Image (tube, rainbow, N blue to C red):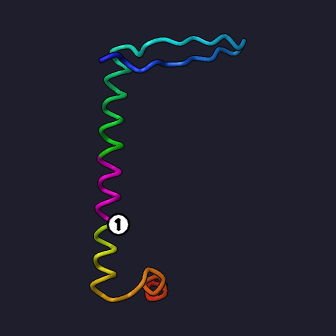
Amino acid sequence: MSKPIVRIVELDGTVIDREMTNTEFTQYQKDEAENLAYKAELQSKATAKAALLKRLGITPDEAKLLLA
């Protein structure tokens, strides 16, 4: 698998495109895994919230009113 390309723009406008180093690529993979886990957690919470509201028989707006 080829590594993603990093674009560096210098102050003088020079553009350098290069492949990520091994260290950068390792960090990139770690960040991507963390982002996927975070998105999955958000989706899980949203699903649980929707299920709770349905079970209570109220809308999100009604829930906001109750919690205000």
Check the image and report above or below for 39 versus 21.
below
Q: Quadrant of residue 4?
A: top left
Q: Amino acid at mark 1?
A: Ala
Q: Quadrant of residue 14?
A: top right
How many other residues sit within 10 Å of disc 1, few (<14), some (14-19) or many (≥20)? few
**How many marks do you count on the picture?**
1
Identity of the residue drawn at 37% across and 18% down: 3
What is the magenta range?
Answer: 37-45
Q: Is residue 41 magenta?
A: yes
Q: Which residue has dot 1 on it?
A: 46
Q: Quadrant of residue 9?
A: top right
Outermost residue, right side: 12
Check the image and report above or below for 68 versus 46.
below
Identity of the residue drawn at 49% across and 19% down: 6
Residue 38 locus on image (x, y percent): 33, 50
Check the image and report above or below for 25 versus 39.
above
Residue 59 locus on image (x, y percent): 42, 84
Q: Is residue 62 magenta?
A: no
